[in-house]
Image: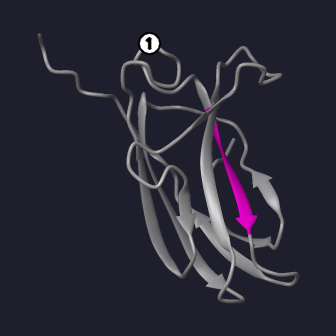
Amino acid sequence: MSTDIPGRRISHGETFYTDWGSRGGDCALLRAQVLMKSSSSGTIRISMETRSAEDTAATTMETSYPSSSPKLLELTSAGVKTAIYTATPGGVDQTGRGFMEQYRFKVTFHGGSAGDYYVVRILPPAFFDNAVPAS
């Protein structure tokens, strides 16, 4: 399974998903890069979805959003953007653990015109566990 994308063309109106991967911690750092774009309009939006390992039908799948603003990783020009997803009480699974066991990325092209495209790279996410201060 691979959730990183070394460079993929995404065209106007298109949505694609990466393969499911196993998480390595309850928090994540996601980096994405626009390598090339064909016009001055349109936005690439990337969100992270998680599910339990047993739920292959994805009936309890959740969409996770970065802990920082904006709530989706949005790319509008060439360059690298970063989003940090942290586990918090009342978070994705309501227990404060953060992500469920598996994750994937949803990449969508919003706006723009027919014929517009971006070439997007998603770097492998860096997972880490949430540090909780002792009470």
If the image is split into quadrants, where does the N terminus sit? top right
Q: Would you say 71 lies left or right of 22 here?
A: left
Query: In the image, what residue type sits under mark 1?
Result: Thr
Q: Nearer the viewer, residue 13 or 132?
A: 13
If the image is split into quadrants, where does the C terminus sit? top left
Q: Look at 74% across and 72% down and name the residue there.
A: 111
Q: Count up the numbered dots.
A: 1
User: Which residue appears farthest toward the bottom when viewing the image?
Assistant: 39
Q: Would you say 31 lies left or right of 45 here?
A: left
Would you place residue 87 above or below residue 110 in this image? above
Q: Which residues are magenta?
A: 103-110
Q: Position of residue 124 (x, y in %)?
A: 52, 52
SS of the residue at dot 1?
Answer: loop
- Res 36 → quadrant: bottom right
User: Which residue appears farthest toward the left when viewing the image?
Assistant: 135
Q: Would you say 11 lies left or right of 24 here?
A: right
Q: Is residue 108 magenta?
A: yes
- The answer to whether residue 5 is seen in the rendering is no
User: Which residue appears farthest toward the right when viewing the image?
Assistant: 114
Query: Badge 1: how crowded within 10 Å, few (<14), some, or many (20+)?
Result: few
Q: Position of residue 81 (x, y in %)?
A: 45, 66
> Disc 1 designates what residue?
95
- Res 110 → quadrant: bottom right
Q: Look at 59% across and 80% down and name the residue there.
A: 35
Q: Would you say 17 lies left or right of 40 here?
A: right
Q: Is residue 31 magenta?
A: no
